[in-house]
Image (cartoon, helix red, strand yellow):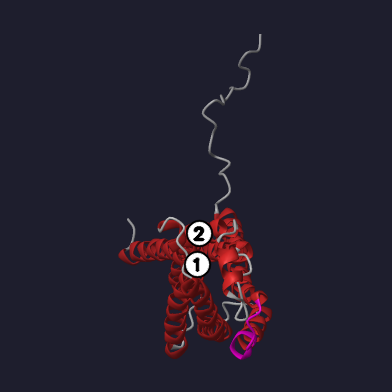
Amino acid sequence: MDEPGQATTGDDHQSASGHDQENFQLLTRAARFTAIAGTIFSLLTMVSFGLLPAMPGPSATVEDVAKFADSSAQGIVRIVALYLMPFACIAFVWFIVALRMWIPQRTSRRVDILLSNIQLVSGTVFLVLFSAASAAMSISAVVVERDDGSFNAVASYAFPQYGGALFFVFAIRMGAMFVFSTSGIGKQTGVLPRWLVLLGYAVGLVMLLSASFNRALIFVFPVWTLLISVTIFIHARKLASKRLATLNLAEPPPSPFDASPTSTTREPGEGEQ
């Protein structure tokens, strides 16, 4: 008869094993969501701004604005505004939530509350400003389509300029705060490799201190997000491989006394004439 202490020890071991399995499933699910959402946001953002044609600048005349409004480029602007940009914003919402779910599951260290709150607030404000800037830069094309081709020179000139200022002056700096806070959390908890932390600080400085309206600056943040997503995905794959190898090693070897159902034992002399 088993002793009570032995039964309790076995139950505790089984409970701990089940708890570890649950934590592993939460970790892999959070890593998968973070990688997928971050990749979708990065690709949609880069494709969107890559497809957007160069809009009339501050020195453009009314004729230049009218010519751009009547060009075939307006169709591309409408596609980007109605389909690509909104889904990029939705993907970034999932990225923020999944990333904040993945970090506590990835490490046993306590995340700094200040950095965690800055990450949440800056990511949310960036998302709002990014959405507003995207809408302002593309609203003229959508209005022209809905109003049967009617053209308003003032609106077609002012809104894209307002959207560009909103993104390059405000949104990109909120993005820099998100990069700084995420890199700081990664350094503090060790969830990100050192090279990615240092790269994040460099990216944050460029976004924070840049006073340029160069379109190339738009791609800095989605490229960094893509690197974060790929790194998390690769780590999750390695972790899953290690756990699978550990489970295989933990399996007991087959007992030599386990007879195969199809095998038969012949007695000495059986079958002999």
Which quadrant is home to the N terminus?
A: bottom left
Label 1 Cα neighbours within 10 Å, binned few <14 / some 14-19 / many ≥20: many
* Residue bearing mark 1: 138
Which amino acid lies under the numbered mark 2 shown in the image of this protein?
Arg
Name which quarter of the figure residue 242 lies in: bottom right
Instruction: Say left or right for 62 vs 108.
Output: right
Which amino acid lies under the numbered mark 1 shown in the image of this protein?
Ser
Q: Is residue 164 above or below residue 14?
A: below
Mark 2–mark 1 distance (CA, rounded to whole Å): 7 Å
* Residue bearing mark 2: 78
| Residue 207 in picture, x, y percent from top left | 61, 84
Disc 2 and disc 1 in contact, CB within 8 angstroms: yes
| Residue 253 in picture, x, y percent from top left | 58, 48
| Residue 183 in picture, x, y percent from top left | 57, 83
Residue 210 lies within the magenta run:
yes
Q: Mark 2: which secondary structure?
A: helix
| Residue 268 in picture, x, y percent from top left | 62, 22
Name which quarter of the figure residue 45 lies in: bottom right
Q: Is residue 23 above or below residue 157?
A: above
Instruction: Say left or right for 154 vs 236.
Output: left
Which quadrant is home to the C terminus?
A: top right
Q: In the depicted view, which residue is nearer to us: 220 or 57? A: 57
Residue at x 42%, y 78% (from the top left corner): 124
Q: In the depicted view, which residue is nearer to us: 158 or 98? A: 158
Residue 99 lies within the magenta run:
no
Residue at x 56%, y 62% (from the top left corner): 44
Residue at x 44%, y 69% (from the top left corner): 93
Q: Is residue 251 above or below residue 210?
A: above
Q: Is residue 112 visible?
A: yes
Q: Mark 1: which secondary structure?
A: helix
Extreme residue toward the front, this view: 63
Query: Which portion, as a residue range, is magenta?
Result: 206-214
